[in-house]
Image (cartoon, rainbow, N blue to C red):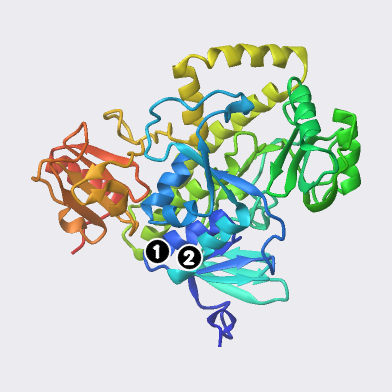
């Protein structure tokens, strides 16, 4: 019998973690937990994957994280690379020179393909994914969380994570506030065929693009991706119709381009909201359940994936019993400010998409300023999340930042992080992970391309310590990896 359906499952802990929602965030989190032997069940309310194909972009930091787990090559063969430039408000500027990453590009990939690859990775590691499991209630106590599904079935876990999107059921059941701004504008997006020559489309797109930055018709295989601003804000629960597209196209372009035979149709607004807290007792929020914002800059999916990499090893440490007392609290302390910054930059970008004379003047000025390499670089680093520095206290500039992939004697640095453990990279050969070696690997390599003697990396690739003193290192090992093993 399926253990999740065992009589009395509401009274005994069956799983360590239940994840609600099996999008990219939920699938990545499940895999991260399984690297540490955590018993994971993923509940997805939809019985089948989404029928439409939407192309999403993986930014530099997400590509680095996938490389750390040995997934990048598998994902990259299904995607298409483009330079890491032109992201901020769609201002067409080249990628900055010598961006500090071995993966300084955007990878476009169909979202269903990405989800399938991430699900496959999680299930290979032993995660269980259950479709058609809609959550309708939850209760938590000192020992765990009880989840009720549609139909009355009850499941039990030590912890629960809501990765169930902007309309998160988990967030609502927790009573966590989701303050922010509702949508003021709406954009229709879909994929369909057209009935006019490509040359006519290209000329019209160029003409309209001088003033309307939310309009796009671009070929995708044998069809066209269509993005067009809508006159009002509709019901997000109701998908737009082909007639809606025709009407808005005629309004913006003076023609509907003979669009027909849609593959999929959707709408998105510019609502911007951030959960008041990411954790309530044994329940946490990640991805769009914790933050929503306009898609400009393509940051949403990446932000959720990065949430999962931050949370996974910390929650696993809590379950395995070695987490320092405050480790799980650092998830919100680190990730919520990152989301706040993303919300701010998407607000700014949406203003730059406006067609009023003021925003257009600011856009012209910023376009000119982005000819300065440092300005362009700063904005691209912000969009791609390689500028993040978590606040770990006083220390060298490297402290709290992610470490780029570098060459080491055993190949490359990220290849040493596939197991999701910490890593002591030691150029001196004098240090040791000692009693923490059951959760931290040690590589003594005098040839490592570092500007400091040694670094201690967390499983998410951020530098937790830099220096050359064993006593100082031990203190930081205890801070991030708990009490030493007996």
Query: Mark 1: which secondary structure?
Result: helix
- Residue picked out by circle 1: 319
* Residue 142 pos. (x, y %): 49, 64
* Residue 154 pos. (x, y %): 63, 75
Quarter location, residue 177: top right
The one nearer the camera, 413 or 79, is 79
The residue that appears at 67% across and 22% down in the rendered structure is 352
The one nearer the camera, 57 or 1, is 57
**Do residues under tags 1 and 2 come within 8 Å of each other at their CB atoms?**
no
Mark 1 surroundings: few (<14), some (14-19) or many (≥20) residues within 10 A: some
The residue that appears at 32% across and 49% down in the rendered structure is 414
- Residue picked out by circle 2: 122
Mark 2 surroundings: few (<14), some (14-19) or many (≥20) residues within 10 A: many
Q: Quadrant of the N terminus?
A: bottom right
232 relative to 223 in the view: left or right: right
Q: Mark 1 to mark 2: distance in Å?
A: 18 Å
Quarter location, residue 330: top left
The one nearer the camera, 145 or 120, is 120
| Residue most extreme to the left | 430
86 relative to 244 in the view: left or right: left
Mark 1 vs mark 2: which is more N-terminal?
2
* Residue 234 pos. (x, y %): 85, 42
């Amino acid at each position: 019998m399926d253990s999740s359906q065992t009589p009395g499952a509401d009274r005994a802990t069956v799983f360590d973690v239940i994840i609600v929602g099996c999008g990219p965030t939920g699938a990545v989190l499940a895999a991260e937990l399984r690297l540490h032997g955590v018993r994971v069940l993923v509940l997805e309310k939809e019985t089948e994957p989404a029928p439409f194909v939407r192309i999403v972009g993986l930014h530099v930091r997400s590509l680095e994280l996938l490389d750390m787990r040995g997934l990048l090559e598998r994902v990259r063969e299904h995607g298409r690379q483009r330079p890491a430039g032109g992201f901020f408000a769609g201002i067409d500027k080249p990628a900055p020179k010598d961006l500090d990453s071995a993966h300084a590009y955007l990878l476009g990939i169909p979202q269903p393909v990405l989800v399938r690859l991430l699900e496959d990775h999680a299930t290979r590691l032993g995660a269980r994914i259950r479709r058609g499991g809609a959550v309708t209630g939850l209760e938590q106590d000192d020992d765990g969380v009880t989840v009720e599904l549609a139909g009355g079935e009850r499941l039990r876990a030590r912890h629960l994570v809501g990765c169930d999107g902007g309309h998160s059921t988990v967030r609502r059941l927790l009573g966590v506030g989701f303050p922010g701004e509702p949508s003021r504008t709406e954009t229709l997006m879909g994929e369909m065929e057209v009935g006019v020559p490509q040359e006519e489309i290209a000329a019209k797109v160029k003409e309209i693009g001088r003033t309307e930055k939310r309009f796009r018709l671009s070929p995708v295989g044998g069809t066209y991706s269509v993005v067009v601003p809508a006159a009002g804000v509709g019901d997000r629960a109701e998908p737009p119709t082909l007639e809606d597209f025709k009407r808005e196209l005629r309004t913006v372009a003076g023609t509907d381009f003979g669009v027909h035979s849609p593959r999929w149709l959707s709408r998105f607004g510019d609502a911007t909201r951030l959960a008041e807290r990411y954790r309530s007792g044994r329940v946490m929020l990640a991805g769009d359940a914790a933050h929503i914002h306009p898609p400009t800059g393509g940051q949403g999916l990446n932000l959720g994936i990065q949430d999962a990499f931050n949370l996974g090893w910390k929650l696993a440490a809590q379950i395995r019993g070695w987490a320092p007392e405050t480790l799980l609290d650092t998830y919100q302390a680190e990730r919520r400010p990152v989301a706040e910054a993303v919300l701010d930059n998407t607000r700014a970008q949406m203003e730059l998409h406006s067609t009023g004379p003021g925003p257009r003047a600011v856009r012209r000025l910023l376009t000119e300023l982005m000819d300065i390499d440092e300005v362009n670089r700063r904005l691209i680093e912000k969009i791609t999340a390689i500028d993040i520095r978590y606040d770990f206290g006083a220390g060298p500039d490297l402290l709290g930042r992610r470490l780029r992939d570098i060459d080491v004697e055993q190949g490359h640095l990220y290849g040493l992080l596939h197991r999701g453990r910490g890593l002591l990279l030691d150029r001196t050969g004098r240090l040791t992970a000692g009693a923490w070696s059951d959760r931290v690997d040690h590589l003594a390599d005098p040839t490592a391309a570092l500007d400091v003697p040694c670094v201690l990396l967390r499983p998410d690739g951020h530098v937790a310590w830099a220096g050359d003193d064993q006593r100082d290192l031990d203190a930081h090992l205890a801070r991030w990896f708990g009490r030493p093993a007996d």
